[in-house]
Every structure is written in C-alpha cells, then in structure tokens.
Image (cartoon, rainbow, N blue to C red):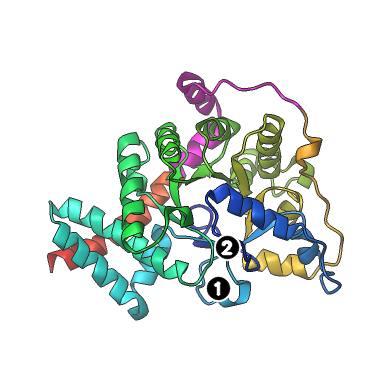
Amino acid sequence: MDVGGTGLLEFVHGKLNVPEASDVRSVFSAIQQQNTRKPQDNMSNTLEQFKQLTTVVADTGDFNEFKEYKPQDATTNPSLLLSASALPAYKNLFDDAIGYAKKKGGSIEEQISSAALKLGVNFGVEILKIVPGRVSTEIEAKFSFDTEACIQKGKEIIALYKGAGIDKERVLIKIASTWEGIRAAEQLEKEGIHCNLTLLFSLAQAVACAEAGVTLISPFVGRITDWYKSKEKKDSYPIESDPGVVSVRTIYNYYKSHGYKTLVMGASFRTKEQVLALGGCDLLTVSPKLLGEIAKLNDKPEKYLDPAKTTQVPKIDASEKNFRWLMNEDEMATEKLSEGIRKFNADAGKLEAELKKALSA
C-alpha cells in the first residue's frame, strides 16, 4: 500500500523493551540492535532472517493489524484521518478537535487549520496508547513551501502532544522534502523536535536533508520505478538496475560514506524483489502483502547495504542554488514531488471540507 507517502500506518515488528531514550536516534539504534540479534531456531523463513539485516516496518491502513504486527512506531496522514474520522468509533476525536478549534477562535479558515492539527494529534495520542515507540504527525501539505509556517505548525503539534502528556521524543514531525520544508526541519531539529522528511525522490533532496541534520528520510522506491517504467515504456527492470532500488542504494552509500546520522527508510515498494534488494538498509516500510510473500520464502536474504562496505563519493554542494538546479535537472523528482504534494493536499482538502461543515453547524 502506498497512500500519500510511506503509507497510512508504519510500524516496526516486535515490541522492544528499552529505557526511555533521550534522543530518538538512540531508540532507532536500539531497534536495530534488537533486529541484529541471532535468530532463534524457528526463525527459518526469509522474512525472519531479513529482519536480522534491516529494521522491518509494516505499511498498512488497517488498525486491526496492530495486533498482528505488534507495532513499535506509527504514522498518520490526511488519508487516514479522512477515512477514520468517518467511523463512529472515532467520532469523539473528531468532536474534540471541533471543540478545540471553536474555543481557540479566529477566522473559519484558521479554525479549520486548528481542527485539522488537533485531529491529527488526537489520533496520534490514541495510537501512542497502543504502540511503545513514536508517531509521525504530518504538517498540512499546503505549507510545503512556507518555512515559517512549517516551523510554527511543528511547534504547535508538539505543544498539543505535551498538553496530552506526550513527550516530544515520541513524536516525529512529517514534512515534505521541499527546500522550504528541509529548512523548517533543520530549525526544528535544532530545537530538539525530530522530523520525518517525506516525498523524497532524489539524491539532491537526501543530501539537503542530511546536511540539515534531520532524523529520518523516506525515499519512495516504487514511485520512482513507476515513473521510469512509464517514461521508458518498460514493464519491468532487472533488480540491479531497478531505478527505485538504485536510488536508495545511492543515497545509503552517500550517507554512510560521509558519516551522516540521518536514517534511510525505503518506502513505497511494488515487489518483494525490491524489498529484498535493499537488505541492510536502516529501515524499510513494507506492505503486509509483500511481507506475507517474503515470509513464504526459505532463501537466505543477502545484505546488500553495509556501512562498512561503502564506496567513497565526492560531496555534493547542498546550497539552495545547487539544490534547485539539481531538482530542475531531475525530471522525475520534480514531477513526483509536485504530484505527491498535490495528492496530500487533495486528501487534506476533503478532510477540511468535513471540518468546515462541523464548525459551521
């Protein structure tokens, strides 16, 4: 599943018992240590072996699958909020967001924005009652090119979580990987607010994110390959030349060869072969369908990505002018980033229409 980015919900297999972390990267490190422990005798299928190489994250929109996959982390987006808010079970979360916005006041547009923000946090708070790790809460797509607005919204999200008794270490602010979004994430990270940079399709975006010191990036394997298949009129690629796989391998190599701490989480997979070709990546978010296919295999997975086996490459200029030039020259990344923002915004617009009805009632 690939709805609006890294999926409706993303979470790590296996509940990890670790002390309260002072830094979210410490938690990720602990998770990876958990996943590199020697497998037990019953861990014979490919999936269980693969989990010893990479932190496997399940990508699903079904709340019931929390029980099956015992999540560590989760993330919300407008598509999830839109669909879940229509369910009677979550009416109280919707109503609470409306009440909050009305009390806060302002223009109808300001109230809609406040309600949308509060609704996302309300869902995040409920999710954190289930998962022991973190939740990613997304900033509205319409602010993707507004640095100050992203910073403000990020701080508002953290304040709302704090008001609900949730420590900021359990929250990742999800922002589109525009130049403006990256600059916002840089400032938020300096203030101890961790970020998940989404809609990432190029090395230029990845370099800018790493230089900004963001916690996590999510390059979209499947969407990259989809674009090239359409452009080059191909049905498939050999896995070693699959454009999405090559993109993540390139980013991973660049990060590790230059010692960046930003973590790489490959997302938006189309086939099990794409997943297995990225064995060793920091994290991978995979649909239950593909996880099921991999679990049926009994082959030993390969560790294709290894920080100890990187190739040194020249550093790329991460200045704004070079970022914009490299994005201009990358037709795929430019198109997919714009398309992704439009899709995020379309879903947010549908949600806001429902919020407006409730606020006007």
Residue 268 appears in the rendering: no
**Boundaries of the magenta span:** 312-339
Q: Residue at x 68, y 39 (%)?
A: 252
User: Is 235 located above or below residue 331 in the figure?
Assistant: below
Magenta stretch containing residue 254, yes or no? no
User: Is 152 located above or below residue 77 in the figure?
Assistant: above
Percent coordinates x, y for residue 189 in the rendering: 45, 40
Q: Disc 2 marks which residue?
A: 11
Percent coordinates x, y for residue 123 in the rendering: 39, 66
Helix, strand or loop at disc 2? strand
Query: Dot 2, how many residues are within 10 Å of its Cα: few (below 14), some (14-19), or many (20+)?
Result: many
Helix, strand or loop at disc 1? helix
Q: Residue at x 68, y 21 (%)?
A: 314
The amino acid type of the residue labelled 1 equals: Phe
Percent coordinates x, y for residue 82 in the rendering: 36, 65
Magenta: main secondary structure equals: helix
Residue 66 — which label? Answer: 1
Percent coordinates x, y for residue 196 in the rendering: 50, 47
Foreground pick, 152 / 227: 152
The amino acid type of the residue labelled 2 equals: Phe
Which corner quadrant of the image does residue 289 belong to? bottom right
- Is tag 2's residue or tag 1's residue first in the polypeptide sequence? 2
137 lies left or right of 31:
left
In whole angstroms, how far apart are the C-alphas of marks 2 and 1?
Answer: 8 Å
Magenta stretch containing residue 313, yes or no? yes
Q: Residue at x 44, y 49 (%)?
A: 174
Quadrant where the image shows the N terminus: bottom right
14 lies left or right of 81:
right
Residue 29 — which label? Answer: none
Residue 324 appears in the rendering: yes
